[in-house]
Image (cartoon, rainbow, N blue to C red):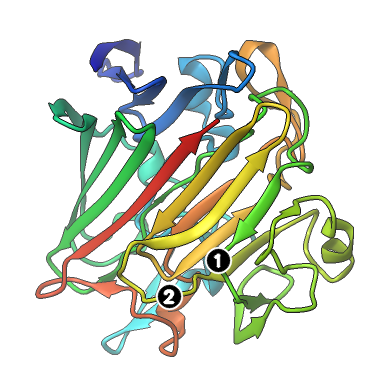
Amino acid sequence: MKIQKRVFGILPNGKKVYLYTLEAGETRFSLTTLGAAWTSLIVPSRLGRQDDVLLGAASFDGYCQGRGALGITVGRFANRIGGASFTLDGRTYGLEKNNGPNSLHGGVRGYDRALWKAEAYKEKDGVYVRFEHESPDGDSGFPGRLRAVVTYGLTKSNEIIADYRAKARARTPVNLTNHAYFNLAGEGRGKILDHELTLSCSSLLEVDQGLIPTGRILPVEGTAYDFRSPKPIGRDLEAAVQGGAPGGYDHCYVVDGEIGKLRPCAEVFEGTSGRTLKLFATQPGLQFYTGNFLHETPGKSGILYNRHDGFCLETQHYPDSPNRPEFPDSIFGPGREYHEKAVFSFSW
């Protein structure tokens, strides 16, 4: 197992941004302190080829520009909050509007724009980077000072461990995740529509045209959204689009099983490489997104990413849950610390 650290770039204020590369098992995983972002993941194939299966920017400057939210750690609240506002304990809080009338991924300057503190370490099963970020009271409109600690690791068993923790000094919505885009054939190697997807999800959240939940939870059986058995991502995509999905899938699924317990939620297989990704999570929801809004987004090696060049599996609390008391509680603070976990397991 190995850990490498180098200067990735320097911000206009003179602060250094670092890049960590973790090696364990047969995989290699790189992360940067800017946005605690995943920048690359080198995974073998059954053909003996090593490929980077993460979409990402070509350079440090690309991550500074932030286009496409490639690999970023999202906070204070992942996904959308309707009307960019919520009411908590009798007070209404206004948030930054950066997705039409709504707030998306924490606002204009969410945790993806932060320079995180980081330290790397080894344990017997793998190598890890612990990221830490202090978010002040009023940050992007959210109440309460909050300290987020996110640990990403790579194990000898070719697993990425994502451990999300937060402590807040006042009651506040918290919903952390990572916005990695995967292409198991290798980034830049075409669309992901032939990938076979299985979701351990019997229902999903109905959304309006702005992708804000209506409050209804619908069964997936008999619909284009049913991935309970392995199915190519593209098989029913057109039917989903005709049913109102903007350009593809961008929906929060309800993960079967007990909330708070690490349980299976997704499996993806890519036939050419033989690669399989299995995902386990403690969170109640899983946002399945097919890169519908990628449009000539600068990627690695001069490639431009476009629609359906990658997919995201974002483990999270339900979108707009601060405005939906019937949803699992996403309010944390004194007496209730935030702690969630996800495991991405790779084989070939």
> What amino acid is at disc 1?
Ser
Q: CA distance from mark 1 to mark 2?
A: 9 Å
Depth check, front residue: 141 or 284: 284
CA neighbours of label 2 inside 10 A, class few (<14), some (14 to 19), many (20+): some
| Secondary structure type for disc 1 | loop
| Secondary structure type for disc 2 | loop
Q: Residue 100, can we see it?
A: yes
Q: Position of residue 137 (x, y in %)?
A: 21, 59
> What amino acid is at disc 2?
Gly
Q: Position of residue 268 (x, y in %)?
A: 61, 46
Q: Position of residue 122 (x, y in %)?
A: 15, 26
Instruction: Name the side, left or right, on which 251 lies relative to 60.
Output: right
Instruction: Name the side, left or right, on which 149 lies relative to 283.
Output: left
Residue on which the image places disc 1: 200
Quadrant of image for the C terminus? top right
Q: Position of residue 228 (x, y in %)?
A: 65, 67
Q: Is residue 287 above or below residue 196?
A: below
Depth check, front residue: 264 or 73: 264
Q: Earlier in the sequence, mark 1 or mark 2?
A: 1
Residue on which the image places disc 2: 257
Q: Residue at x 64, y 25 (%)?
A: 187
Instruction: Name the side, left or right, on which 56 lies relative to 118.
Output: right
Circles 1 and 2: CB distance less than 8 Å?
yes
Q: Splitting the image into 4 quarters, where does residue 152 fall?
A: top left
Q: Is residue 100 above or below residue 134?
A: below
